Image (cartoon, rainbow, N blue to C red):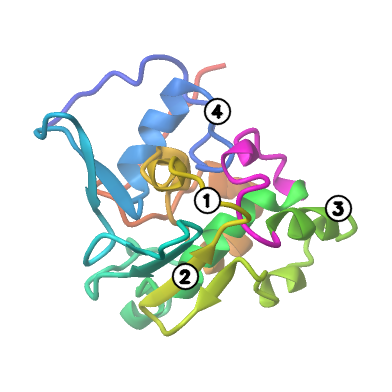
Amino acid sequence: MLYSAAGGRVKTLDPVKADDLASRNMAGSIFDTLLQYDYTARPYKLIPSMLSEMPEVNAAGDRFRFKLRDDLYFAADAVFKSKSERKITSRDIIYSFLRFADSRNHSPVYWMFRGKIRGLDEFHRKSQNLAAGDFSLYDVVPEGFRILDERCFEIILSKPDPRFLYMLALPNAGIVPQRAVEHYGEDFARHPVGSGAFVLKKWIREY
């Protein structure tokens, strides 16, 4: 059995809403990210986590191509009817990033990607006019994202940013399943479904 201190009161387990250290640390245990740090290297460097290899970067430094591993699944949950529905695809990655820009989520960490990915700010503006249960905007992928196939996708920046890949290793960039988010709604922050090393079994909240 492993015991770990959260470092404070956990407020939320939704990665796009976690702006305090305790919540980010706990979310990082439940949700996986595309990249992670190799802490044994000196100096520290990024290595693949959900990816089969490091992203390809074009000469201009504003287009990144990613390839997912083929063994990625979200944790078993009642919202999924079969294991195939739990398979993580490029669509899940794009959806997870778009959630930052959905104004209805009031994400305090939207700054991570604001102004960086083409079309993301326009997605943010359009989301301001949508009702709470309207997810139709997610059906139209902004120009800054290109889904090549189920495992390969691209992210195109508004301008080169050498810090961009480092953002993808932060716990806030954890990948979430659209099916679970839409099913649980606001309760997703208390009923997280991810692909990380741990699964939440019980949360005794203190106020």
Question: As shown in the figure, which amino acid type bears the numbered disc 1?
Answer: Pro
Q: Secondary structure at mark 4?
A: loop
Q: Is residue 185 left or right of residue 205?
A: right
Question: Of marks 2 and 3, which one's residue comes earlier in the chain?
Answer: 3
In front of the other: 176 or 182:
176
1 vs 4, front mark: 1
Specify the label residue 160 is tagged with.
1
Whole-angstrom CA distance, mark 1 to mark 3, is 28 Å
Q: Which mark is residue 19?
A: 4
Q: Residue 178: x and y, percent?
A: 55, 66
Horizontal side of residue 128 vs 104, given as left or right: right
Q: CA distance from mark 4 to mark 3?
A: 21 Å
Q: Nearer the viewer, residue 139 or 200?
A: 139
- Which residue does the image show at 39% across and 41% down from the upper left? 166
**Disc 1 versus disc 2: nearer the observer:** 1
Quadrant assignment, res 85:
bottom left
